[in-house]
Image (spheres, rainbow, N blue to C red):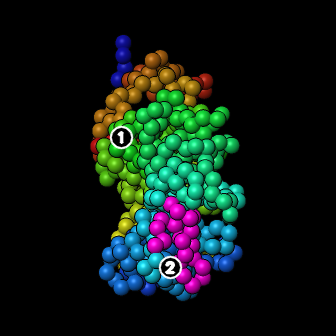
Amino acid sequence: MRTLAVISLFFLPVVNCTSQSFETAGMPTPVAQIRDISIDTIGNKMYTVGIQTLDGSGMLSLNTAYMYDGTTWTSMDTLYNVTYCSAFYNGELIIGGGFVDSAGVNQKYLSKWTGTKWVHFGDSINNTVLGMRIIGNDLYCMGHFTHIGNINVKGIAKWDGSTWSNVYNCPFTGIVDCTIYNGDLYVAGNFDSTEIDIIDIAVYKAGTWQKVGVTDYVKGGLGSISCMEIYKNELYIAGFIAKFEGNVGHGIQKWNGTNWSEAGTGVQDNTNGYSTWAPVYDLMVYQNKLYVGGAYWYSGNIYSRGFSTWDGNQWCAIDTTFTGSVKHAVFQDTLFASSATDTVAGIYVNNLAKFTDLAVDSCSIAFSIDENENSSILDIYPNPTNGNVTITLNKMLPDAGLSIINALGEVILKRDLSFLNEIELDISNFPNGIYFVQIANNQVRSTKKIILRK
C-alpha cells in the first residue's frame, strides 16, 4: 500500500539590497557607447573607445578615444566612424574598427597613437577589425578582413612587433576573440564553414581546424560569441548563445577540454527562463572571480540585471540597480563598467560607472550541492515545475528525513519521512529559482534539484 504525504514548503527568498554602489566615472563629453577599455599598467593609464563624441552630436561619424589617469580625462584627437576594439601593446595604444580615419587622412580599420596623433597601422587591410588580444609577445587582430600587409589572411592575423603573419591558414571571417587553452588556439565569433561544419567557435588542434565538441558544440544560426575567458582551468564562452537553439548553456557555457556544460544554471532572460535571448558581452577574471556583463536579467536564477560574478560554484549579483555592462575593467584597484544607458537608477553615469565597493546584493544557491550517485532513488516531476511537483521514492528508507535547501545553501525545512514513498509539494507561492531536495538516513543520501519557473 502506498503512503502519501502532502507538504507545503515556505522557502526563504534571498533579500536584495537596493543601495547603489556605483557613481559616474566623470567622462567629460557625451558617450553613446563604449566598445572597449584598455589598461596601460606601466604608464598607469586607462583608455576607452567606441562612440564618444566631442560635440555632443551622438553621431557615428565624429568620435574620440579618451585617456584617463585616475583624475583627468583627455581626448585623443578625432576619429571618424565607430571604433570596436583596442589594445595597449609594446607601449602603444592600437585601435581597430569599421573605419578609423584621422584629420581627413585615410587610416582604415587600424591605427595607433603616437602621443599627438593617430597614424595608420598594419599596412593595407581590406575590412573591419572586430577584436584584439595579446597572447605572449604577439598581438592578434580579428575581424572580417582577408588580407593585411602583403599577405593573405582570413579573419585573424598575428603581429610580432615588426611582421604580420598568417595564423594556421584560418578559413573563417567574423572572428572577434581568440585564446590559447590547453596549448591549442581557439577562435570565436560569428562565422560558419559549410566545408567543415563549424559554427562560431573552432580549435586548431593536431594540424587541423576542428569543431569544439563532438555532439554539444555551439549551435544555432542566429547566435554568435562575443568573448572567451579561461577561468579555473575551463574555457568559458559567452554571447548570443541560446538553449532554444540546442546549446547546453544560455548566454554562457564552459568547456573542460572534453565536454560542454553550464555554469550553474547560467543566465536567464526577463522571465527568469530561457525562451528569449539573454546575451553576455564581456568576461573578466578579477580577485579569483569571473565577472560577467551583458543584457540578461538573472544569473543562477537570482535577479542580477546584467552584471554579476561566478566563482565556479555560485552566482552573485553585484548591484541589482545597475542595468547591465557592455565592457568592464579594473584600473587603480577600481572596477569600471560601461552601461547601455547614460542614466542608471537615477544616477547620471554617461555610460561609464565606477564602483565604490564590490559588496554583492544577493547570491544563488551553491551549485556544489548537487545530485549525487544515489539520485536515482528520487524521481521529481514535472521538473522544471510551475508550482506543483511530486517526489517519488523507488524504495522505502527506514528512518529517513527530508531536507529542503534554499538559495543560500541553508536547510530551511526538515520532515520525518520514515516509510513514505511519495510526496507532493506546492511551491507555487515562492520565487523562481533552484531548490534542492535531500532525503537521507544513516546509510543512504539522495539529492536532486527542483527548478521553479513560473
Q: Quadrant of the N terminus?
A: top left
Between 357 and 403, the residue placed more toward the observer is 357
Residue 281 in the image: state x and y as whole percent: 45, 57
Q: Quadrant of the C terminus?
A: top left
The magenta stretch spans residue 209: no
The residue tagged 1 is 221
Question: Tag on residue 29?
Answer: none
Q: Is residue 62 visible?
A: yes
> 10 Å neighbourhood of mark 2: few (<14), some, or many (≥20)?
many
The residue tagged 2 is 66
Residue 378 in the image: state x and y as whole percent: 46, 25
Query: Could you tell me the amino acid type at mark 1?
Result: Gly
Task: Give the vertical position of 20 relative to 278 (above or below).
Answer: below
Q: Earlier in the sequence, mark 1 or mark 2?
A: 2
Identify the residue shown where x is 49% and y is 22%. 377
Identify the residue shown where x is 55% and y is 50%. 152
Q: CA distance from mark 1 to mark 2?
A: 36 Å
Q: Is residue 90 left or right of residue 53?
A: right
Identify the residue shown where x is 49% and y is 52%. 146
> Element type at marker 1?
loop
Residue 189 in the image: state x and y as whole percent: 47, 49
* Magenta residues, start to end: 106-125
> Element type at marker 2?
strand
Quadrant in the rendering for residue 14: bottom left
Tell which residue pokes out farthest to the top in this image: 1
Identify the residue shown where x is 35% and y is 75%. 61
Query: Could you tell me the amino acid type at mark 2?
Result: Tyr
The magenta stretch spans residue 111: yes
